[in-house]
Image: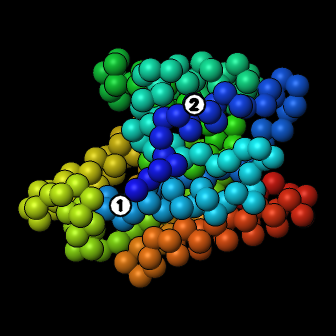
Amino acid sequence: MWKNINLEQCLSHINRQPDDRLNNSAKDRPAVTISRMCGSGGRTVASKLAEYLQPLAPYGGHWTVFDRELIKKVLEDHSLSTRLAEYLPESNKPLLAEMKAKLLGKANATATQIVEHSVETIWRLAESGYVILVGRGANVITARRKSVFHVRLVGSLEKRIRRVEEVYDFDRHVATEYIRAQDAAKKLYLKEYFGQDIDNPELYHLIVNTDRIAYNEAARLISDSIIHWFKQKQGSGAEPE
């Protein structure tokens, strides 16, 4: 179902990064964050969006989707932050330090360390460009990066229940409880660690209701919006906002 969302492609993206010690162009590379209600089609839309965004990809490259589980996997098994640091040594250290400081006292040492690594990893991925970051507060973490476009996917509980039943083969009761738990966890994560309300529309460039717009069309709509937004900013000589 999500053929282009996999660890192999993520590692390929990391290994082909240009060296910004020689070419300081990271601020010009576009990236996308997707925040979503559980069952609103986040992975499906992200997968299709990666295909539609190819006109913005560098020569020989492609857009890569990092969802919550893939970010966790590469953090645990492949030292992603360290690998990216080799290519992007000029990351915004004051901002990273500020965000890490906000975490202190809000969790035990282990949880805080995990979130710290997530913050740094997501920032570096956005800096590397041509990535779609799904979940984990990526929209808040990258809010100050002018070349990142933020999307929120929403939908009715009823249709999201049917989607989760279909994807995970849950019965209605389990699907309903799963959605409620996931949505609550996402909301709490953003509130606890970043002091933000996930439902605040001001955090996003675009909010799409996947009840009313099919996943494929949603991806096309988002892609068209991003391409127009980014090329318009490039043409005006201003950084995307």
Residue occupying the far bottom of the picture: 212
Compared with residue 216, is residue 42 higher up or lower down, i.e. above or below? above
Q: Which residue is mark 1?
A: 37
Amino acid type shown at disc 1: Met
Res 99 visible: no
Residue 169 in picture, x, y percent from top left: 18, 57
Q: Which residue is mark 2?
A: 11
Amino acid type shown at disc 2: Leu
The residue shown at (59%, 45%) is 64
Residue 136 in picture, x, y percent from top left: 43, 43
Mark pair 2, 1: CA separation: 27 Å
Neighbours of disc 1 within 10 Å: few (<14), some (14-19), many (20+)? many
Q: Nearer the viewer, residue 205 or 83?
A: 83
Instruction: Report the side of 148 relative to 36 (left or right).
Output: right
Compared with residue 156, is residue 113 higher up or lower down, i.e. above or below? above
- Which image quarter holds the N terminus? bottom left
Neighbours of disc 2 within 10 Å: few (<14), some (14-19), many (20+)? some
